[in-house]
Every structure is written in structure tokens, then in C-alpha cells.
């Protein structure tokens, strides 16, 4: 096989998967049927958790340079100012909420992929996918036949890969259609705030709405509005899934101006229309995120309302979860069940996001949350947990400290030799393998032994750091927790160990069971290569979560 993995789709999800594979030395072919990258700002919000992922991927600087900060939302109803939300996250969260058009996110990711020696083949789509215990045979629209080890379908809501697998995609559609437009306005609303305006009829229903999301540029917004009657007659997609940009005439500037004249909180003129489209919304999710050696991610696996900017971010984190598992499988060192864990861990996340965004679209963001901080962290995708996954150690749901399966938090004020300024913990997670953090109260020997044994168990795919309150001499890299922030964030009360997975989630805490936890992800090199679920086994719709 000349190529290890074929990635279908060159949007943010496919590019993320390809980058993460290439970072680990895995060859991949990335194809997309579109001749040019789309210039629509379909997804514009980047969540704090995704910025953490981008830091690990090496694209954070470029994303921050191109973005603006989303500072909050101002709400109007029937012409009256009724509320203001300021997006202020707690001090332990390293990044805020960013706004960036999807095509700019794709550009940055494509440039990163090019740095890693790969590109996108455009004008090429999937025709058929056939798999057996040895690999996957893929026929593409350029008449090429590829034999690869794995296929990752990031090919959108009308995914060919999903259809080839025979996965169901159950759900429903919103009756309303919306029009989107990227425009500039001359109003005096504060920079960095979304503007949400609704008008209610006498029966209490919403008969007009405007949502303006800030974009980089001078008073530039992506505006969402109900579609006027003359633009509602649109052809169907052909597969019964009405989601995304619709075919037919695009809204003109005068359509957008008419809504602004009705609803804007002050007189304003729209100008410089960059693009516009009619957008339809469905909410659907697959019955399984993969089967055998073939997987789906992003819109190919789940679609839902864009409320709260969850879709692209969820898809990027799908790819980030999957790619390191596929990479270990390609290398022949994946533990049994590793790639199957992608569905076990990510499908519940997709189900929750679909439910949450539908609820938020009808009731407002944060509906049903116990506190503003919880709502913020949930929207920021910081509360995702894989507790109960077969890959993570047992957790204690009653404990008030970070548990296996939860996001590993950052910590500041770390000191190490040869570095003049304090470090953040996330700067130690820049590798492509697992990380083992050993916290010592001064004794070194047993930690050096554990670190060496762990590196052997992980076939060298592990970075080990010794964290201490004050400097000690060790053969391990020593990091001093000078501000005690690591101890606080991780609830450290004595000597202990933490296994951090490549996707930034805690796999294990405690000195006992470190090697056993690593073996849940990485197995002995001498064992035969495991290729995941064999295609002749029960179809995932019949066996997943049984």
C-alpha cells in the first residue's frame, strides 16, 4: 500500500485528520470533489477547547492572528434591549472564544498540511468503498483504485462514505429556512458582540429574526435571517437530507437591507456583500461512527442547528480523537479495540450536541444549565468527558478533582532549567504521543523506574516529566511547580502519576495502574497487527452499545 489512510473531504475536519496523521508519520491521501475551496463563512465560531487542539497541532498563532474575539451577545426583542451576555471564562481556561470565517480556518489548516508534505487533490470524490480484514479498496472519481489501511469520511452531510457503509442517519428537519449574508454595516453596536434580534407576533410566535455574528474586518458580520417568500422555493438535495446551503438564487443585498430596516436596533445601511445563500437545518446522527476500517466524522456523522457554534468544533474534535488511534493502528502497536473506542467516546458527544443545539435553538443558549459558568464551559466544549470509556481508568464521580476521561487542565508558573520564563503545562503536550506526569515530593528513584518502564511499555511513544515543588536532580526532565498551580488544578495531595492521552484527556491518575492504562491504548510490538473490527462481524447498528 502506497498510502496508509484516505481522507475524504478537505474541510476543517478532513484537514485536521490529515494533519494529525502526518504529524505521526502516517501517509495519507486527501481528496475533495470541489475544484476550489468554498468561500462561504458557514462556521464562524471557534471554541476555547478547539483553540487548545489548534495549539497542539501547531496552528494556534495563525488562527489567533486571523481571528477576532467573540466578547458576548446583545439581545433585543420587539425593539427593546432585553439582555447582554459577556463571554467571560474562568481564569483556568487559557483561551477565549474566537470568530473566524470557515474558509480562513481551512486555509490555515491546508497550509499546515502542506508544511507536513501533503496536499489536497481537488475535483476527486469517492465512488465506492470495499473493505476486508487486510484493508480498504477505494475507487475514486478519477478512476483510481487505492488500497489503503483506513478510510476517514469527512465528506459532509451528504457523505458518500456514510452511504457506502450503510449507516443510518436518523433525525428531522426544521420547517424554517434561513438566509445568510456576509456584509458590513455602519451601526454603532460594540465590537466583538453578536447581535440577536427577534420580533414576536400577537400569538407569541417569532415572526422575524436577525442574528449578526462579528467577523474580522471593519463592522463586518455574518447575518442570519428568515428567508423571504420569493426565495423559499428551492430544489431538494435528492437524498432527503435538507441541510446546508441550498441551490437556487442567492439573496441580494436588498433582501438583507429589508430585514435590517425592520429589525436593526438603529438605522443602518448594509454594504459590501461578500457572499449569501439560503440555508436549511436538519438534526441527524449516525447509528455508528465507523465500521471496521472505515469511519465518519463531522457533518458526515452529525448535523444540527448552528446555535452556539458547536458543529465544526465537534467535528474537529472527532478527527482529533480518531487520528491518533488510527496512527497507532497503522504502526501495528494499537491495543485491541482502540479504533472501536472512537464510536464509544465520540458518538455520545455527538448525541448530546445534537440535543443541546436543537434545545438551544428553541429555548436559547444555556437553557437547562445549573449556572452561567456551567453553561459557558459547556458551550466552550470544556466539559466533554470520556468517563466509562474502555480506554480510561476508573473515575470517582464524587471527587472534586480532575478524573480519568476528563480534559486535562492547563497550569501556569512551571519552571525548568535553561528556560528563562515560566511555562504552561500545555507546552509540555506538544508531542504526538502520550505524556506521563510524575509528581514527586522529593524522592526520585521509584519515579525514574516507573518512567523507564512506562516508556518501554509505550514503545517510546511517551514523554515523561517529573514535577516537583522544588528542584531535584534526576535523569528525567524536571519541571518545578513554582506557583503550585499544577497541584491545585490536578488536586494533588501527595506523590502520584497522571497519564495524558494524545488528545489532551486524562487517561489515568495514581501511581498504581500506569502501565496497565498505557496498554489499553498501546500493545506489545510482538503481537500481530490489529486492524479493528472485521467487516464480516455484526454491523455496528446492531452491536454498538449493546
Image (spheres, rainbow, N blue to C red):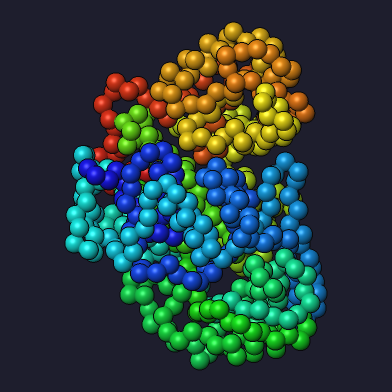
Q: Viewed as shown, does residue 313 lie left or right of 138?
A: right
Looking at the image, is 408 positioned above or below residue 200? above
Residue 224 x, y percent position in the rendering: 60, 76
Q: Residue at x 68, y 13 (%)?
A: 472
Q: Quadrant of residue 26?
A: top left
Q: Quadrant of residue 499?
A: top right
Q: Viewed as shown, does residue 540 lie left or right of 303?
A: left
| Residue 269 seen in render | yes
Looking at the image, is 441 positioned above or below residue 309? above
Q: Residue at x 67, y 49 (%)?
A: 95
In this view, the residue in front, 45 or 517, is: 45
Question: Quarter holding the N terminus?
Answer: top left
Q: Residue at x 50, y 79 (%)?
A: 277
Residue 91 x, y percent position in the rendering: 76, 43
Q: Quadrant of residue 189?
A: bottom right
| Residue 356 seen in render | no
Residue 450 x, y percent position in the rendering: 53, 14
Q: Residue at x 73, y 33 (%)?
A: 421
Total numbered labels placed on residues in the image:
0
Residue 524 x, y percent position in the rendering: 35, 21
Question: Quarter holding the C terminus?
Answer: top left
In this view, the residue in front, 338 or 67, is: 67
In this view, the residue in front, 163 or 28, is: 28
Amino acid at each position: 500500500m502506497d498510502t496508509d489512510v484516505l481522507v475524504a473531504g478537505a474541510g476543517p475536519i478532513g484537514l485536521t485528520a490529515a494533519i494529525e496523521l502526518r504529524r505521526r508519520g502516517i501517509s495519507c491521501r486527501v481528496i475533495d470533489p470541489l475544484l476550489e475551496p468554498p468561500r462561504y463563512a458557514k462556521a464562524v465560531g471557534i471554541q476555547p477547547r478547539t483553540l487548545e487542539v489548534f495549539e497542539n497541532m501547531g496552528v494556534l498563532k495563525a488562527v489567533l492572528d486571523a481571528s477576532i474575539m467573540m466578547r458576548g451577545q446583545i439581545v433585543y426583542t420587539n425593539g427593546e434591549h432585553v439582555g447582554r451576555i459577556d463571554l467571560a471564562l474562568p481564569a483556568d481556561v487559557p483561551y477565549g472564544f474566537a470568530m473566524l470565517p470557515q474558509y480562513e480556518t481551512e486555509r490555515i489548516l491546508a497550509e499546515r498540511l502542506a508544511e507536513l508534505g501533503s496536499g489536497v487533490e481537488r475535483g476527486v470524490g469517492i465512488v465506492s468503498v470495499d473493505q476486508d480484514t487486510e484493508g480498504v479498496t477505494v475507487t475514486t472519481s478519477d478512476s483510481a483504485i487505492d488500497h489503503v489501511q483506513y478510510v476517514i469520511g469527512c465528506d459532509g452531510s451528504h457523505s458518500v462514505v456514510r452511504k457506502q457503509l450503510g449507516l443510518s442517519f436518523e433525525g428531522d428537519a426544521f420547517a424554517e429556512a434561513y438566509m445568510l449574508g456576509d456584509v458590513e454595516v455602519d451601526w454603532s453596536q460594540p465590537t466583538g458582540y453578536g447581535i440577536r434580534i427577534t420580533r414576536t407576533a400577537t400569538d407569541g410566535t417569532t415572526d422575524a429574526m436577525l442574528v449578526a455574528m462579528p467577523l474580522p474586518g471593519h463592522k463586518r458580520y455574518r447575518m442570519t435571517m428568515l428567508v423571504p417568500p420569493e426565495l423559499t422555493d428551492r430544489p431538494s438535495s435528492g437524498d432527503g437530507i435538507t441541510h446546508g446551503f441550498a441551490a437556487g438564487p442567492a439573496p441580494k443585498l436588498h433582501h438583507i437591507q429589508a430585514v435590517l430596516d425592520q429589525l436593526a436596533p438603529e438605522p443602518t445601511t448594509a454594504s459590501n456583500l461578500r457572499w449569501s445563500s439560503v440555508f436549511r437545518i436538519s438534526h441527524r446522527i449516525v447509528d455508528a461512527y465507523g465500521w471496521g476500517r472505515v469511519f465518519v466524522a463531522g457533518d458526515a456523522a452529525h448535523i444540527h442547528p448552528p446555535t452556539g457554534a458547536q458543529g465544526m468544533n465537534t467535528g474537529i474534535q472527532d478527527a482529533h480523537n480518531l487520528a491518533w488511534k488510527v496512527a497507532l493502528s497503522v504502526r501495528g502497536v494499537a491495543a485491541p479495540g482502540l479504533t472501536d473506542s472512537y464510536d464509544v467516546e465520540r458518538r455520545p458527544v455527538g448525541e448530546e450536541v445534537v440535543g443541546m443545539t436543537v434545545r438551544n435553538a428553541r429555548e436559547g443558549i444555556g437553557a437547562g444549565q445549573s449556572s452561567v459558568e456551567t453553561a459557558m464551559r459547556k458551550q466552550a466544549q470544556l466539559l466533554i468527558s470520556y468517563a466509562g470509556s474502555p480506554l480510561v481508568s476508573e473515575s470517582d464521580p464524587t471527587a472534586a478533582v480532575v478524573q480519568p476521561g476528563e480534559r486535562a487542565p492547563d497550569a501556569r508558573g512551571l519552571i525548568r532549567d535553561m528556560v528563562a520564563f515560566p511555562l504552561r503545562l500545555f507546552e509540555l503536550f506538544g508531542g504526538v504521543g502520550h505524556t506521563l506526569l510524575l509528581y514527586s515530593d522529593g524522592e526520585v528513584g521509584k519515579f525514574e523506574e516507573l518512567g523507564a518502564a512506562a516508556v518501554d511499555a509505550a514503545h517510546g511513544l511517551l514523554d515523561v516529566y517529573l514535577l516537583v515543588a522544588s528542584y531535584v536532580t534526576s535523569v528525567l526532565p524536571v519541571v518545578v511547580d513554582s506557583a503550585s498551580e499544577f497541584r491545585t488544578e490536578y488536586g494533588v495531595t501527595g506523590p502520584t502519576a497522571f497519564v495524558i492521552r494524545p488528545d489532551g484527556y486524562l487517561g489515568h491518575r495514581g501511581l498504581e495502574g500506569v502501565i496497565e492504562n498505557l496498554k489499553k491504548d498501546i500493545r506489545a510490538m510482538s503481537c500481530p497487527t490489529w486492524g479493528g473490527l472485521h467487516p464480516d462481524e455484526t454491523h455496528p447498528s446492531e452491536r454498538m452499545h449493546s
